[in-house]
Amino acid sequence: MFQIDEKIEYQRIQQFASQVSNISNRLTNELEEHFENDQSDEFYSGLLAGYSNAFSAIQNDELSESDQQSLLGALVAFIADKIAKRGL
């Protein structure tokens, strides 16, 4: 498997950001329309880590197709359980 709570370093953030030019104008507009941009830097760093790690998870060749399909739901439940136990 892979680390599911990996923090994304700035160099990797820049690497991801360089891919924004590959997004279609239609999809960029759709994403902008649904992006509030009113959270803390820490929140967005965590959000990026979550999406990045989810993207990696669904591309993991070590998992069966069935496990790949259920992995995101399992990750959401697992992390939610960890947060709930902290009382956040």
Image (spheres, rainbow, N blue to C red):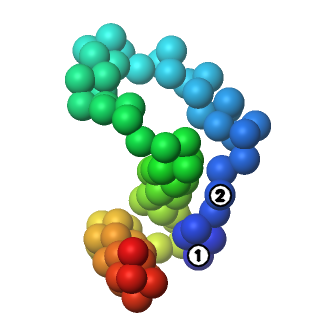
Is residue 30 placed above or below 77 in the rendered structure?
Answer: above
Q: Which quadrant holds residue 10?
A: top right
Residue 31 pos. (x, y %): 30, 27
Residue sitting nearer the eye, 29 or 82: 82
Say which label, 2 or 1, has the lower sequence index.
1
Give the foreground label among 2 and 1: 2
Identify the residue under disc 1: 1
Residue 67 placed where, x, y %? 36, 75
Using residue 9 as the reference point, say whether residue 18 is left or right of it. left
Distance (Cα) linking label 2 and label 1: 16 Å
The residue labelled by disc 2 is 7
| Residue at image coords 72%, 47% | 9
Name the residue rendered at 28%, 16% in the picture.
Answer: 29
Horizontal and vertical percent for residue 58? 42, 59
What is the three-letter code of the residue carrying label 2? Lys
Is any part of residue 1 visible from this angle? yes
Residue 40 image offset from top left, x and y in percent: 49, 43
